[in-house]
Structure formats: C-alpha cells, structure tokens
C-alpha cells in the first residue's frame, strides 16, 4: 500500500532542481571566456586551464564528499556544497586577476559541485527508492539537461546585456536563494527519519544486498566492470563537450555553432533520459547501458567521418540520446550491488575514475588536434574506447531487488 504522504516525490523534485542549478552553473564557464579575454587579455589556453583544474578538483573531491555523505548524510553535504558554489560565483563577480578565476571557478566551484552534483543527489535518491531507484534517478537526472537548456542561454543573455559581473551575481543568487533553502527545509536524509519506508510502500519488505564497505567494493570485479564502462563515458563526454565547438569552426561554422549543437544534444538527452526511465523495468540496466554505449559509438564513428556542418546536427541528436542517461543507470547498478550505507564513498570513487578519464579525453583531443591538424583521430580513439566499454559491460551482472510481503501482511495471509 502506497503512503499518500510519502516524501519521495518531493525529494526527486528537489534533486531535479538542484541538478539544474549545479550543472547549469558549472557548465557556464565557457560563456565568460570572451568577456574576460576582451577586458583583461587572458588567452584561451589560460582560461581552458582553469576549466581543467575544475574537472580535476571535482574528481578528487568526489570520494571525499562521498565519505562525508556516508557519515553526515546527503542533506547537509548537498546544502553546504550548493551554498559554496553560489558564494564562489558571487566572488567571481569581483575578479580582476586571473588567479582569482582559478581559485573561484577552478577550485571552489568544483568542490561545491562535487558535493551537490550527480553523485550526492544519486545517493539521496537511492536512500528513498529501491524498487523504483533507476526510474527515479533517471527522472531527477533530467535536471542536468534542463539546467543546460535554461541557464546557458540565460548566461549569454546576461553577459551581452548587463556584463559578466552581473551575470556571475545572478547565477550565484539563483543557487543560494532557490536551491539551498529547498534542500534545508524539505529534504530528509532517509525515509526512516519521518517514519516512512523506501518507495513509500508500507506493506512490503525490500530485500536489498548487504551494504558493502569501500574496501570490499574495490576488491569486487562488479565495481570495476561498471566503473570501466563509466570511464569510457567520461572520456568521450568531455572530448565532445570541450572540442566540438572548435571542430564546428574547423568545418566553417560560426563561433556560436558549438553552443547550439550542445544545446541540441542536451534536449535529445533530456528526452532520452525520460524514455530510459520508462524502459528500465522492461529491459534492465545492463541491456540499456550496452545500447547507449553502442549508440554513442556510432555517433563517434559518424563524427570522425564528418566533413560538413549538416553532419554535426545529426551527430548532436544521436550523441545526445546516449549522453546523460548513462549516469543514472551506472548509479543504479552500483546502488543495487553494494547497498546504500557506503554508497557515497563507493560511487565517489567511480566518479573520480570517470573524471580522470574525462581529463584524459580533453588532453588527448587537444594533443591529437595539434599533431594531426584535425579531430578525426581523436574521435576514432573515442569510438575504440566506447567499444571497450561495451565489451566490459557485457560481463556485468545485475543484482535483483527482492520485494516480499511484510511479516505483518504474511501473518494475515
């Protein structure tokens, strides 16, 4: 019997809003490159290095935030990290030296993002849902795409009409005024805190796997199978995010085309995220993961052979279908396998490896572009790495969640 006052749906909604703000803010950095270059003369290489620092810092702090979540609960970590992220953007409105951009965006924003991004919110959802975990993770994760669709164009509008300083202020206030209070006043760490059960089902006992320690997970082949596949996601995700705009210019496109293509990919990803959530119970996480890796592989093969602008639009749609939906599926696999008690540190370690692969994707993309004069070899490399991800995921074994009648209901029968 479903508890009509079940808090779970509101938790999903707030994680959706949190991910909108977190991903929207963290991905706006490129929008500030032009004004910072125009005003202070900071070149693209210097500003890109700050982005790389952000990625590395984010990855390093994933397992650290995971341990804090395991100890103190996701609510306080998400709220505090969101506040830090907002403050970092307010501070960015005052920058006059390049080292300030490195500290405020490259370090402080990244630390905040590590604690209020996908990993932290996935742990929170996993505490509230077991039977519907993957479906609810997919729904909340749509916030990542919607945040890009709303906040990236808004940032460009604010910079063009009010200047980069006011844009930093508005973005910082959005997460401080909207996200932080919602997390503090509505979210609970666990359904038991309010006398509820996971999924809001008061008539069943959910038999989930015993929670594992991080040390046990690191010795498990299931952890490494899921993580290696996820690493192929990280490598190719950031290879596209950071280098597609330059590739579009190489093919004769306007400088704004890259943002347009990434926006199309984000919209396709949001639609795919919703569809994926509906298909999980029918096909299972493993089959969907392999399908998404395969679709992304085909997209990279297409991109490697692209020589015209129209081909990039097709790539954006196909790639978008197979981009963000991978995240809730991997999170669901790890949650089902290792339980919730140490999920923060376990999932944080998975994200650390994801980010190391992401940094390598950015570096390899730039290096191969420099030595070869084009991006084809970079994209073929991405295709090969995705093939490794598919083969690895083939050996993945899903853990089933066993739902049985509660002892009370059983005794009545």
Image (cartoon, rainbow, N blue to C red):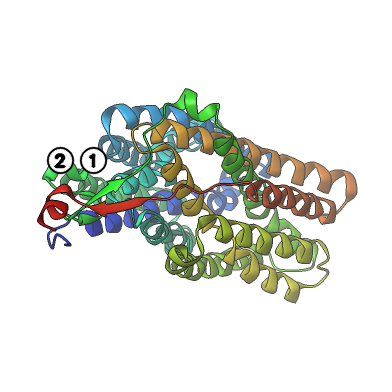
User: Residue 393 at what x, y percent from top left?
Assistant: 63, 49
Q: Of 72 and 294, which appears nearest the observer?
A: 294
Q: Is residue 246 left or right of residue 138?
A: right
Q: Which mark is residue 211?
A: none
- Secondary structure at numbered mark 1: loop
Badge 2 is on which residue? 193
Residues at circles 2 and 1 in contact by the CB criterion of under 8 Å: yes
Tell me which residue sits at (84%, 52%) in the image: 377
**Structural distance between the alpha carbons of marks 2 and 1:** 7 Å
- Secondary structure at numbered mark 2: helix
Quadrant including the N terminus: bottom left
Q: Image height check: is 99 above or below 8?
A: above
Q: Image height check: is 12 above or below 165?
A: below
Mark 1, Cα crowd under 10 Å, few <14 / some 14-19 / many 20+, is some
Badge 1 is on which residue? 189
Mark 2, Cα crowd under 10 Å, few <14 / some 14-19 / many 20+, is few
Tell me which residue sits at (70%, 44%) in the image: 361
Tell me which residue sits at (55%, 51%) in the image: 35
Q: Is residue 294 left or right of residue 56?
A: right
Quadrant including the C terminus: bottom left
Q: Of 357 and 219, which appears nearest the observer?
A: 219
User: Residue 258 at what x, y percent from top left?
Assistant: 65, 63
User: Residue 155 at what x, y percent from top left?
Assistant: 45, 58
Q: Is residue 185 left or right of residue 46?
A: left
């Amino acid at each position: 019997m479903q508890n009509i006052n079940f808090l779970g749906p509101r938790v999903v909604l707030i994680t959706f809003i949190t991910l909108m703000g977190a991903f929207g803010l963290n991905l706006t950095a490129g929008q500030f490159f032009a004004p910072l270059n125009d005003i202070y003369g900071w070149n693209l290489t210097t500003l890109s290095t700050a982005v790389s620092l952000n990625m590395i810092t984010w990855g390093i702090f994933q397992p650290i935030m995971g341990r804090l979540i395991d100890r103190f609960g996701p609510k306080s970590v998400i709220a505090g990290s969101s506040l830090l992220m907002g403050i970092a953007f307010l501070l960015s409105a005052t920058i006059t030296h390049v080292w300030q951009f490195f500290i405020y965006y490259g370090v402080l924003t990244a630390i905040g993002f590590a604690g209020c991004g996908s990993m932290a919110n996935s742990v929170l959802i996993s505490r509230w849902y077991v039977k519907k975990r993957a479906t609810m993770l997919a729904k909340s994760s749509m916030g990542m795409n919607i945040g890009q669709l709303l906040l990236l164009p808004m940032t460009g509008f604010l910079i063009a009409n009010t200047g980069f300083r006011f844009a930093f202020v508005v973005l910082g206030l959005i997460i401080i005024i909207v996200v932080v209070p919602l997390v503090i006043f509505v979210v609970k760490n666990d359904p038991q805190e309010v006398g509820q059960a996971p999924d809001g089902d008061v008539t069943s006992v959910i038999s989930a796997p015993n929670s594992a320690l991080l040390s046990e997970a690191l010795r498990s082949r299931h952890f490494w199978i899921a993580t290696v596949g996820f690493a192929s996601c990280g490598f190719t995700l950031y290879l596209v995010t950071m280098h597609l705009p330059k590739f579009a210019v190489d093919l004769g496109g306007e400088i704004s085309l890259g943002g347009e293509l990434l926006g199309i990919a984000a919209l396709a990803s949001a639609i795919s995220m919703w569809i994926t959530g509906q298909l999980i119970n029918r096909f299972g996480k493993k089959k969907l993961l392999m399908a998404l890796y395969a679709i992304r592989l085909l997209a990279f093969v297409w991109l490697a052979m692209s020589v015209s602008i129209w081909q990039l639009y097709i790539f954006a749609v196909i790639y978008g279908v197979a981009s963000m939906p991978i995240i809730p599926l991997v999170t669901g696999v790890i949650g089902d396998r290792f339980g919730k008690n140490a999920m923060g540190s376990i999932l944080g370690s998975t994200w650390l490896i994801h980010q190391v692969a992401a940094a390598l994707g950015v570096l390899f993309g730039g290096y191969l572009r420099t030595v070869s004069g084009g991006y084809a070899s970079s994209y073929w490399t991405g295709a090969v790495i995705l093939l490794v991800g598919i083969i690895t995921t083939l050996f993945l074994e899903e853990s089933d969640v066993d739902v049985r009648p509660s002892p009370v209901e059983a005794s009545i029968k």
